Structures are given as structure tokens and as C-alpha cells.
Amino acid sequence: MQPWQLYVTTGDTRQALSEAVCEAFDNQRGQYNSEKRYYPEKWFEPYISRRRKVGWDLYGLLEIEKGDRQKTHNQHRRNFLFFGAPVGMIFTIHRQLATGSWLDYGMFLQNIMLLAREAGLHTCPQAAWADYHKVIRSVLPISDDEIVVCGMAIGYADPDAVVNTLVTERVGAEQFTLFLD
């Protein structure tokens, strides 16, 4: 079905999008929410521990201590600047489509990321953009029939940036795979 719609922004449009969302993020913290729930209402194990581990590993690299709201805000805000990448993409899906289409969408996103790597580019998928769908609509021609799925930065990673040294731990296949004869 190819249930995706993609908005690729560069130049002035990318800049306008980033400025609009950064202004909303800076001035109205917590007032924006995704149209579709991304995370569980209540976290549980083992997922909450895995999520926290990645977060603390990242913030440790960036020397952001627990409770430092300003540094945390500044780091989160970088999402809306596409982490400095020259290309920012916003992905949407028709709001009447169901779970299967969202699964197809995940494969589409993965293919973009793999093709970018093949071309020597780097990507960063960003769920944070979905919370600002109303602001995004004020800049991009997204219809009310579409839900913002996520954003994605695409460009060349800075090998000297400490953030790019983070390697997230992954559980072994034996923890999520049952091999049957």
C-alpha cells in the first residue's frame, strides 16, 4: 500500500520549520502531545531499564547531570534543529490506517536509513517531532487527514562530536528468540 507521505526540507523551509518548533518548545514546555501514543502509558521491565540505560549513557557522555533541566532542555531542543543536519524529513501517515500500515512504515524508515548509509550518509530518526504536529502544520502543507509519525535528520555525522561515540547496548538474541526444532 505504501502508506507513507514524506516531506523533505532543506534551506529556508528547514530553517522556518526548526525556528517555529524551537519557539514552541522553548515557550510552552509540556503543552504539546503526539496524536498517536508513542510510548506506553506506564513503563515496565525490562523496557524501562533499557530506556533509562540509553538515556543515562547519552547524558553521561554529554556531562548532563540528573536534574540539570537547562542542559536537558538544550539537548532535547537539538532534535528540532535536526542535530545540525542539512536535510530534515517529516513523515506522516493517513489517520485512518491501522497497525499493519504502521508496521510497513517502520520498514520504510529502516530502508531509508540503510540506503543513506550505503550512500555514505547518516540518519537520526526522531520521535520528538510528532508532539509538534500543530506547529509543523503551520509551516508544511500537511493535511488534517495525516498524522505526523516522526522526523529524521540526514547528513554526515561529525566523527569528533562526543555524542556520536555513543554505542547503545543491545540484548543478546537468546533474550528475545526461541529456537524450535
Image (cartoon, rainbow, N blue to C red):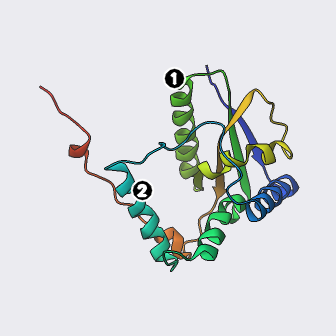
Q: 61 left or right of 95?
A: left
Q: Classify 168 as above or below 39.
A: below
Disc 1 designates what residue?
Answer: 100
Q: Residues within 10 Å of mark 2 (few under 14, many from 20)?
A: few
Q: Secondary structure at mark 1?
A: helix
Kind of residue at disc 2? Arg
Q: 81 left or right of 14?
A: left
- In the picture, the quarter occupied by the N terminus is top right
Disc 2 designates what residue?
Answer: 51
- In the picture, the quarter occupied by the C terminus is top left
Residue drawn at point x = 55 percent, y = 42 percent = 38
The disc, 2 or 1, on the residue closer to the chain's N-terminal end is 2
| Viewer-nearest residue: 139 or 181 | 139
Kind of residue at disc 1? Gly
Residue drawn at point x = 43 percent, y = 68 percent = 56
Residue 77, given in percent of the width and then of the height, sits at 68, 64
Residue 141, given in percent of the width and then of the height, sits at 85, 37
Residue drawn at point x = 59 percent, y = 54 percent = 123
Q: Residues within 10 Å of mark 1 (few under 14, many from 20)?
A: few
